[in-house]
Every structure is written in structure tokens, then in C-alpha cells.
Image (cartoon, rainbow, N blue to C red):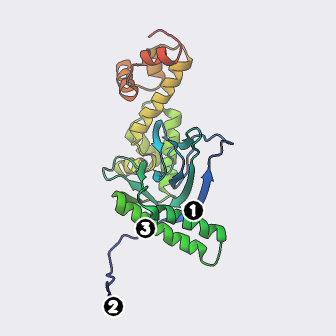
Amino acid sequence: MSNRHYSVKEQDVEKFNSKLLSISNARDEGDWKSIPHTHPFTELFFVSDGKGSFLFDQTTHSIYPGDLVIIPPYTEHTERSLPNQPLEYYVLGIDGISFLASDKTTGQIICNFNDDTSIFNLFHQMLQEIRNSQYGSEAICQRLLEILILKIIRSKHLIPVSINSVRITKECAQIKEYLDVNYANRITLDTLTNLTHMNKYYMVHSFTRYAGLSPIQYLNRRRLEIACHLLESSNHSISDISSLTGFSSQSYFTQTFRKAFGMTPVMYRQTHGETAPS
């Protein structure tokens, strides 16, 4: 008789204040158009079949079976299937926690678990528990979520970030709304701290966790989005567009635009819109 005995030691593992809000399973059947949208909570989007693309704000990523997409709160996103390869996926809505990559640069993360069937099984088990709705189903789903979070962190070396969605989300949403509306004005970090009455460092750190970009990075991206629209649909000069979108000078606008799109505003207009004075 062969016998192996292992003692279970108490480990100091961080307790996550995560809460499962929802779970769904969907298959793209081409009967509705997916449009960019946001949520006030973290989403875990797991691809079980099909191929397509996932849009984070203005960045598009290819997605395949086994891919797990982590979407921070208030990050605009959507998914699209490739022709004849409809996406099938699970989506968890979770509160109280978000994630950062190990380099701490962004909360927008895509990682692949195609070689780990236990991840798919955890999503599937949670869905079955909710569908059956038996005694203890919600508690079991919560425990399965905790296991899933631990496996994701351990496998992909992600950094868990506890979030207070009642207080911080309200303030980050306030910042986002202010930047979306007032992009043409001169805006500094002091402007935003005065708006929210938050410590400057804490404000920047909190907003970056939610949006995946710092407030100033988000502001510049918003300005570039408006600039692209004006270049495509108006005959405003490059100088006027620079001013209308809040850039301090035409040269800085051109420099920022080239860095983002690999071409000057003039070249962009020639490619995408009407010819206009520059």
C-alpha cells in the first residue's frame, strides 16, 4: 500500500473584499450590434469559443479561445466577432477589486489560459450554480470567484487592487465627466484636486486604476478624439483645431498627434477627410 500524507499549513494570503455581482454566458449570433460601453465595476471576460477583437477605448486587440480580458471600472470597451467565427464567452461582474499588470502601467489586461482548463471550469461551474439556484448557490459562486482570483493572480503575476466603489468610483466618474466636457479648457492636476477635494497623488492613482490612464493621458486622448472628428468633418485650419481642442500650441498638437497616430494632422486629413487650410 502506497500512501502520501501532506500537512496543510496556514498561509498568510491576502483577503480580497471581492463580491460577485453577475455572471452571464453569451454567443454572438449577429442579431445585435455591440457598441462601446462602460460599467462602474470590474468585468472578467473569458472567451470559450470563436475569434474576434476586443476594443479598449481606441486600442483593438485580437482575442481567441482561452483569453481572459480584465476590464477596469469606467473603461469603455466592446467586443466583435470575426466573420463565421462567432465569439462565445462568459462575463463576470465583480465589485471591490481590480487588477494591475506587474509593471503597474495599466488595469486593462488580456491574458491567455488556453493551457489551463480549470479557468474555464470555474466560469462554467459558477454559471451552472446560478442557473440551478439551489441552496447555497450564491455562497458557492462567491467561493469559486475567490479561487478564480487567486489562480489568475498566481498564474499571471497580477497585482490585486482593492477598490471602494462607493466613494472612489463617484469621484473618478466625476473626473471623467469633467474631462469629457471641458477638454478645450486649460486643465491641470490642481484643477482636478480642487474639483474632487482629493489628495493629488491619491487622485491620480485612483483614476489610473479605474481608467487605465492617468487623468492627463485621458485628457490628451479625449482631445485627440475630438481633433480627429474635426479633421474629418470640418474645414477648420490645423491651428484652429489645435486651439479648439485645448492644446497649448499648434506645434505641441502636431507632435502629440504624430506620436499617437504615426502621421501629422495634415496627413490624417488628406487620408480621412476634406482638404483644408493648415
Reply above or below: 49 against 216.
Answer: below
Query: Residue 263: x and y, percent?
Result: 39, 21
> Identity of the amino acid at label 1?
Leu
Query: Residue 250: x and y, percent?
Result: 38, 18
Mark 3 residue crowding within 10 angstroms, few (<14) / some (14–19) / many (20+):
some
> In the image, which disc is placed on residue 108?
none
Reply above or below: 239 against 127.
Answer: above
Q: Residue furthest right?
A: 31
> Identity of the amino acid at label 2?
Met
Q: Residue furthest front?
A: 1
Q: Nearer the viewer, residue 247 or 8?
A: 8
Residue at which label 1 appears: 21
> Identity of the amino acid at label 3?
Phe
Which of discs 2 and 1 lies nearer the camera? The answer is 2
Residue at which label 2 appears: 1
Quadrant where the C terminus sits is top left
SS of the residue under disc 3: loop
Q: Quadrant of residue 247?
A: top left
Residue at which label 3 appears: 16
Residue at position x 40%, y 47% in the image: 208
Mark 1 or mark 3: name the one nearer the start of the chain. 3
